Image (cartoon, helix red, strand yellow):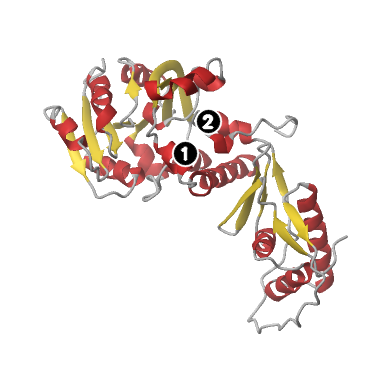
Amino acid sequence: MLNLHDCLRPNGKEVAAKVMDGEAILINLSNGVYYSMDKVGGFVWELIEGGCSIEQMIVAITVRYDVSREQAQADVERLTAELREGDLVAVQTNGLTPAKNHQPQVQSRLPYEAPTLNIYRDMGDLLALDPPMPGLAEMNWKEPDDESSR
Amino acid sequence: MRPRLISCIIPVFNGERYLGEALKSVLAQTYQPVEIVVVDDGSTDGTAEVVERYSEQVSYLRQSNQGSATAKNLGLSATQGEFIAFLDADDLWHPEKLARQMARLRERPDIDLCFTRFQHFWMPELAEEAKRYQGHPLSQPLSAYLVSSLLVRRTVFETFGQFDNGLRGNENMIWYLRAAERGAFIEVVPDVLTYRRLHGKNITREQLRKGEFLDGVFFPILKAWRDYQRQRLDG
């Protein structure tokens, strides 16, 4: 279980990620499995990229979305566990006491949906329609072993 | 019945080396009539001089360098054909490519985008790479969506929109996926009628060398793919 002061960092070695229109898409370059998180999930990924601690993430979510702290914490803990399981993030143990968080005044909070980490194994289908140019080292990933998810 | 006009649009940036061969493969088409337009995307080499040699049969448009998407859209606005075919300046067509695709579109008027299977071929400077790829799927005929093999009715652009101006390298795939998401019917004719040239100056190789490929080119394609899959599964 992560400490509230721990920070997560994207696993820069094997994972490429980009946020587009609020949706975070992550590719595991070693096997072509890719993931997406949108809405609250996309926001969480931006927080991870920003080096936030778990506590800072929870607070940022409750400021932006209409959700209780308890729900936000439970969802952040679940989501970060899934991200760690997929080797998409690495933990940076902090151990420092966070500064008191100042909650800015907001007009109204956005409706909340529990964030989801979606996993896709159909990269092969896309590459069949748009084959990589021969010699592309950057896309030298092998096909995922598990074909059953297609 | 008079054969319907096909407009062949060839966007090009610094393509003097292989453009002449591409043009010859269009001029050799058994299907006529074909109007040919080269859209020069701000070339700084001898591209214009190559086109000049074919000036009786080929029109030439020039824009400042803005990317292939903008060049293709300019070609669309400058042509009259009921059907549009694209050809990259370094690729080639089989002489019967347009004829066989038109025959298919006559059989199946519900097809919106018609591709053909294509074959990669390597230039001598990539002989080592070609050797490494012997027997590899990428050296075999491919049933993929390659812009140089595309024949499409002009009305498809009215229905599904044009290429996103300014995109470089991914505008084609993103356009196909958006069209598919909106209901376009896509087919690949099984004959190998298009040949994709692999050489040291392929734009994708340049983008790779600059580290631009994944972030600038591939991720937007992957997003468009997800949007299409979401629509396909959710209805």
Quadrant location of residue B33? top left
The residue tagged 1 is: B173
Nearer to me, A13 or A67: A13
Looking at this view, is A34 or B15 the one in front? B15
In this orientation, does residue B133 appear? Answer: no
Is B135 on the left or on the right of A5, as rendered?
left
Amino acid on which disc 1 is placed: Met
- Badge 1 crowding class, 10 Å Cα cut-off, few under 14, some 14 to 19, many 20 or more, is many
Kind of residue sitting beneath label 2? Leu
Q: Which residue lies furthest to the right in this view?
A: A1
Q: Is mark 1 on a helix, strand or loop?
A: helix
Image coordinates of residue B224 in percent, x first then y, are 53, 45
> Where residue B165 sits in the image (x, y, percent)?
36, 50
Q: Mark 2 lies on which chain?
A: A
| Residue under the image location 50 percent in, 28 percent down | A134
Q: Name the residue under label 2.
A: A129
How far is mark 1 from mark 2, CA to CA?
Answer: 9 Å
Q: What chain does badge 1 belong to?
A: B
